[in-house]
Image: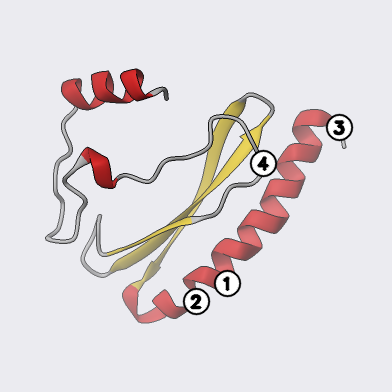
Amino acid sequence: MSAEERRSHLARYPMVPFTPYTLREPAHLPLLPRHGPQRAAPITQYREYALDTAGAAVPLVLGGDLAAVSVALPMAQAHRLPEIAALLRARVGDDLVAAAFGR
């Protein structure tokens, strides 16, 4: 989203905290590239949506579109999250780009 689209969206749908760790300020949200590499860095979160859960979103830039694949793990396995997110970024990203663009 553009900065204006993001402001408009957040005005209509304010950020609601699910846990004490949930981001509450729009300025703290990670920004994703509008155009750029076919794979952006994974975004990880810990106990932001559910107290016993860690998760990662792997952004995928497919042409002019942005998509994401995500994974969630119990906090007891949170140490595995960076490795799993990197694997998703590499494997799923390649497969989706190949499917979208016939590469």
In which quarter of the view is residue 54 placed? bottom left
Label 2 and label 3: CA atoms lie apart by 32 Å
In which quarter of the view is residue 99 placed? top right
Query: Could you tell me which quadrant the N terminus lies in?
Result: top left
Number of numbered markers: 4
Residue 57, x across and y down, in percent? 47, 51
Q: Nearer the viewer, mark 3 or mark 4?
A: 4
Label 4 and label 1: CA atoms lie apart by 20 Å
Label 3 and label 4: CA atoms lie apart by 17 Å
Give, as a three-letter code, the residue at label 3: Gly
The answer to whether residue 47 is above or below residue 30 is below
Q: Nearer the viewer, mark 4 or mark 2?
A: 4
Number of residues whose C-alpha sits closer than 10 Å to that of mark 2, classed few (under 14), some (14–19) or many (20 or more): few
Query: Circle 2 sits in a helix, a strand or a loop, which is it?
Result: helix
> Residue under circle 4?
37
Label 4 and label 2: CA atoms lie apart by 25 Å
Number of residues whose C-alpha sits closer than 10 Å to that of mark 1, classed few (under 14), some (14–19) or many (20 or more): few
Q: Is residue 26 left or right of residue 34?
A: left
Q: Are marks 1 and 2 in contact (CB under 8 Å)?
A: yes
Label 3 and label 1: CA atoms lie apart by 27 Å
Sequence-wise, the earlier of marks 2 and 3 is 2
Sequence-wise, the earlier of marks 4 and 1 is 4
> Residue under circle 1?
83
> Residue under circle 2?
80
Residue 59, x across and y down, in percent? 54, 44
Q: Are marks 3 and 4 in contact (CB under 8 Å)?
A: no
Residue 40, x across and y down, in percent? 58, 47
Query: Could you tell me which quadrant the C terminus lies in?
Result: top right
Q: Is residue 79 left or right of residue 62?
A: left
Label 1 and label 2: CA atoms lie apart by 6 Å
> Residue under circle 3?
102
